[in-house]
Amino acid sequence: MIRLVGIVTGLVFAFVVLLAFVTGAYTFATEPHTQTAEKAFHRVAHVPAGGVSYDGLAPQWDVAQLQRGYQVYKEVCSACHSLEQLAFRNLSELGYTEAEVKAEAASWTVPGIDPNTGEVNTRPGTPVDRFPSPYANRTAAAAANNNAVPPDLSLITKARHHGSAYVYSLLTGYRDPNTYTNEEGKTLAQAFPDNMPGTGLHFNPWFANLNLAMAPPLHTTGQVTYADGTEATLPQMAADVAAFLTWAAEPSLVDRVRLGWMVMGFLLFATILAYLAKKSVWSQLKIREED
Ligand code: HEC
């Protein structure tokens, strides 16, 4: 009797689950999917035309580019963004001498403490200091930026999908929501008037929710003057700073890939050796079998 009740209960349960599944699947298949502004307008990150030197099977740092990217970071981005995982001494990896790194560090102002009174003050940077935040704290940062805190950029190329390409796309991706059309030929103003950027927000199809609180930081050709004479166009500055931030997030990227190839080479060698050893051991055994 108890077994019968158990079987009936099980069958009822299975029937209810099946019913729920079938009605759910039916609704999914028949009802039109609601289109969101993000789905209709969000664009996938892309690398600069001509590609980047630090991607692919044989990545290389273009040191001149990293130096230009550093200049863009220093002259533009550092007004709002810190780089707290990177110390000034790391710049020596970009081809600067010890004296140049010292001078470069001293050109920055970092938070300090007055040795006589213990009061908080500021002082010139030294090579061991890290790239500081321009704001005293998060509240001050939010207050200055329409309530959005500019994130620390040390790991930003790791923290976003296709990070390096994303930074490039974001910086070159500001558009006018009244004239920019998506794949369906619609403008944001026509298709999703409710998603138009509010005050202090800027439309950028590469940003996840389309409107961000960062005004276009790179906007004019010649905004920085490159020491090496490269023309500072918007795509050039964006590509350079994206390269610099990629290096900042993973200075060992190039070495890591090189080491990877060496490990693969060694494993191949070890496999061949193991195969030959196996052949040699079994050849002996076969001779004995034939005796
Ligand atoms: C005037 C201040 C300001 C300057 C200058 C500035 N940013 Fe920003 N940035 C912001 C703010 C504010 C946010 C946060 C935006 C948000 O979340 O809506 C932000 C966000 C970002 C993000 C993250 C976007 C995301 O996916 O969350 C990146 C990357 C970025 N900035 C890169 C840069 C680079 C590179 C430069 C220099 C070329 C730069 N920013 C210059 C204020 C600034």
Image (cartoon, rainbow, N blue to C red):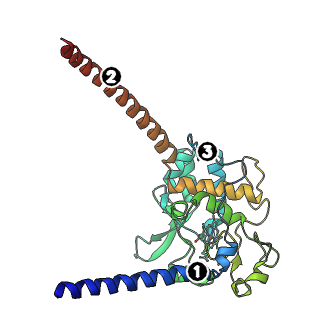
Q: Position of residue 125 (x, y in %)?
A: 51, 61
Which quarter of the figure is the C terminus placed in?
top left
Report the residue at 39% width, 28% height from top. Answer: 269
Q: Amino acid at mark 1?
A: Ala
Report the residue at 82% width, 75% height from top. Answer: 179
Q: Nearer the viewer, mark 2 or mark 3?
A: 2
Quadrant housing residue 35: bottom right
Figure quarter occupied by ligand 1: bottom right
Whether 61 is drawn above or below 225: the answer is above
Question: Cα distance, mark 1 to mark 2?
Answer: 63 Å
Q: Identify which residue, 143 or 289, lies in the foreground.
A: 289
Report the residue at 43% width, 32% height from top. Answer: 265
In the rendered image, the residue lying farthest to the top is: 291
Mark 3 and mark 1 residues within 8 Å of each other at the beta carbon: no
Which quarter of the figure is the N terminus placed in?
bottom left
Quadrant housing residue 46: bottom right
Disc 2 target residue: 276
Q: Nearer the viewer, mark 1 or mark 2?
A: 2
Disc 1 target residue: 148
Is residue 263 visible in this depiction of the protein?
yes
Q: Position of residue 167 (x, y in %)?
A: 63, 62
- Which label number is shown at residue 63? 3
